[in-house]
Image (spheres, rainbow, N blue to C red):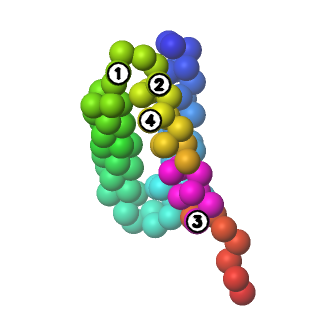
Amino acid sequence: MIFHEIAYALHLPGSAAQRPPGALGAVPELSGTASGLSGFLGTAIAVTATQGAGLLSDSTPVSVAATMVALAAAWLRAALIAFRPSRA
């Protein structure tokens, strides 16, 4: 786990600032706001998912797996909408 967290910490600043997909590179004047908002949203989603998994818990790993599958499906849908080719 520690290696994952170290790699994540080293990777995140570059990927957040990268343009065009990065949150911080879209409008450089608002990079502080984008940084705070992306951190808040990431934490809020993680807290919500944790609470949802806890509420659905039946003492088996099924609730955690269901939460992970639901979040992965939601992320995939959002990514497909956000990164679809523009219609010129």
**50 in magenta:** no
Viewer-side residue, 71 vs 23: 71
The residues colored magenta run 74-81
Query: Is residue 50 visible to us here?
Result: no
From the image, tell me which residue sits under label 1: 58
Query: Marks 1 and 3, Cα distance to the nearest angstrom?
Result: 34 Å
From the image, tell me which residue sits under label 4: 67
Foreground label between 1 and 3:
1
52 vs 3: above or below: below
Name the disc covering residue 81, or none. 3
- Residue 74 spot, x, y in % from top left: 51, 51
37 vs 39: above or below: below
Query: Marks 2 and 4, Cα distance to the nearest angstrom?
Result: 9 Å
From the image, tell me which residue sits under label 2: 62
Q: Are marks 1 and 2 in contact (CB under 8 Å)?
A: yes
The local secondary structure at tag 4 comes to helix
38 vs 11: above or below: below
Query: Marks 1 and 2, Cα distance to the nearest angstrom?
Result: 8 Å
Q: Amino acid at mark 2?
A: Val
Label 4 crowding class (10 Å Cα cut-off): few <14, some 14-19, many 20+? some
The local secondary structure at tag 1 comes to loop
Query: Marks 3 and 2, Cα distance to the nearest angstrom?
Result: 29 Å
* Residue that appears at 53% across and 38% down: 69
Quarter of the picture containing the C terminus is bottom right
